[in-house]
Amino acid sequence: MPIKFFCVPATLPGEAEAELNRFLGGHQVVSIDRHLGSANGAPVWCFAIEYIVPAYGVRDTNAANPGMRKDRIDYKEVLPPDVFARFSKLRELRKQIAESGRVPIDAVFTTAVRRAHAA
C-alpha cells in the first residue's frame, strides 16, 4: 500500500492542514502514524498516511461524493441474520472508536476486517 507524507506546522497549520484534511477526506485510509518534530527550529506535526489505491473504475469521481464506491454491497442482504447482527455491532463500535480518536473510520478497522470477524 502506498504512503503519503505530510508536515503540518504546529503553530500556524493553515494550508498544510487543509491539504491533509482534503487528502484524508478523499482516500480510504488504513493507518496514520504521527509524530511531533521540528523543522528549522519550529514545531511540526509529521504524518505518514497509509492508504488503499482503488482498482480502476471502482471509485465514483462524482465531486459531490468523492471516494464513494459505485458498487456498494448491502450486507443485510448477503449475510445471515446472526452474522449481520455482529457485523452491525462492529460497525457501531468502529464508529465510536473513530469519533473518540478523531480518526477516519477505516483507520480503526476496515469493512473487510469487520466482515471477516462477524462470521
Image: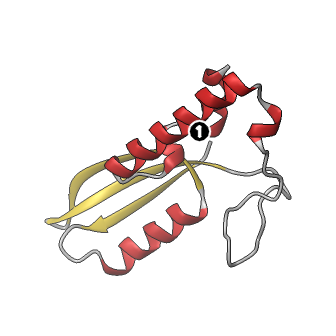
Q: Splitting the image into 4 quarters, where does residue 57 fall?
A: bottom right
| Residue 30 visible within the image | no
Q: Splitting the image into 4 quarters, where does residue 42 fall?
A: bottom left
Q: Which amino acid does label 1 sit on?
A: Thr
For the point 82% across and 34% down, which residue is it?
Answer: 78
- Label 1 neighbourhood size at 10 Å, few (<14), some (14-19), many (20+)? some
For the point 75% across and 38% down, which residue is it?
Answer: 76
For the point 41% across and 47% down, which residue is it?
Answer: 98
Placement of 18 over or under 30, stated as above or below: below
Across and down, in percent, residue 25 comes to 54, 65
Colouring of the image: secondary structure
- Residue at the extreme top: 119
Across and down, in percent, residue 21 comes to 45, 68
Q: Is residue 108 left or right of residue 86?
A: left
- Closer to us: 66 or 80: 80
User: Which residue is denoted by mark 1 in the rendering?
Assistant: 110
For the N terminus, give its image quadrant: top right
| Residue 72 visible within the image | yes
